[in-house]
Image (tube, helix red, strand yellow):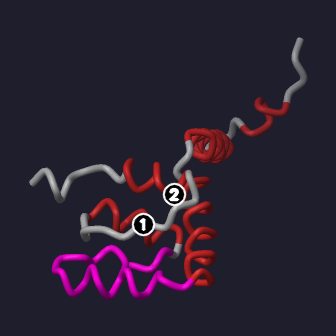
């Protein structure tokens, strides 16, 4: 149960350093990878053969460069700043739908 419910914080930490990630297919890791377009096959390491295959896939410096870009994007969208911006946008959308859009744009008194 712990393996399937572990948060993707380790993966996000590696992403924040621009380091490509390979790993076990935990649900949170797969969800995080899907969000940023990271290759899911690198997160499906359930046997020695899978690990060897993943390491061979990322052996090329060009491939690692592409993965670093995906990792950097993953770090951005998992950052507290990005979460705050998304939350603020959601609050503004709800306020507008409730008819409070003009109140948000009113000048301060």
Q: Which residue is mark 2?
A: 15
* Residue occupying image coordinates x 59% and y 80%: 61
* Badge 2 density bin: few <14, some 14–19, many ≥20, Cα 10 Å: many
The image position of residue 63, as x and y in percent, is 57, 83
Q: Which residue is mark 1?
A: 21
Magenta segment's dominant SS is helix
The image position of residue 98, as x and y in percent, is 61, 41
* Badge 1 density bin: few <14, some 14–19, many ≥20, Cα 10 Å: many
Q: Say which element carries label 1.
A: loop
Closer to the chain start, of discs 1 and 2, is: 2
In front of the other: 106 or 65: 65
The image position of residue 62, as x and y in percent, is 62, 83
**48 lies above or below 27:** below
Q: What is the spatial separation of the Cα atoms under label 1 and label 2, in whole angstroms? A: 7 Å
Would you say residue 53 sits in the magenta stretch? yes
Would you say residue 97 sits in the magenta stretch? no
Q: Which quadrant is home to the N terminus?
A: bottom left
In front of the other: 52 or 90: 52
Q: What is the magenta range?
A: 38-60
* Residue occupying image coordinates x 46% and y 49%: 13
Whether residues under marks 1 and 2 lie with C-beta atoms below 8 angstroms apart, the answer is: yes
**61 lies above or below 21:** below
**77 lies above or below 95:** below
The image position of residue 60, as x and y in percent, is 54, 85
* Residue occupying image coordinates x 52% and y 75%: 37
- Name the side, left or right, on which 49 lies relative to 101: left
């Amino acid at each position: 149960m712990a393996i399937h419910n572990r948060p993707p914080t380790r993966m996000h930490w590696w992403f924040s350093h621009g380091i490509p990630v390979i790993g076990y297919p935990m649900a949170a890791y797969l969800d995080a990878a899907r969000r940023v377009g990271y290759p899911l096959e690198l997160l499906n390491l359930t046997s020695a053969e899978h690990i060897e295959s993943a390491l061979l896939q990322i052996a090329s410096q060009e491939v690692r460069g592409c993965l670093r870009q995906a990792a950097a994007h993953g770090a951005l969208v998992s950052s507290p700043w990005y979460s705050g911006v998304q939350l603020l946008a959601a609050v503004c959308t709800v306020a507008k739908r409730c008819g409070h859009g003009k109140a948000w744009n009113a000048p301060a008194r």
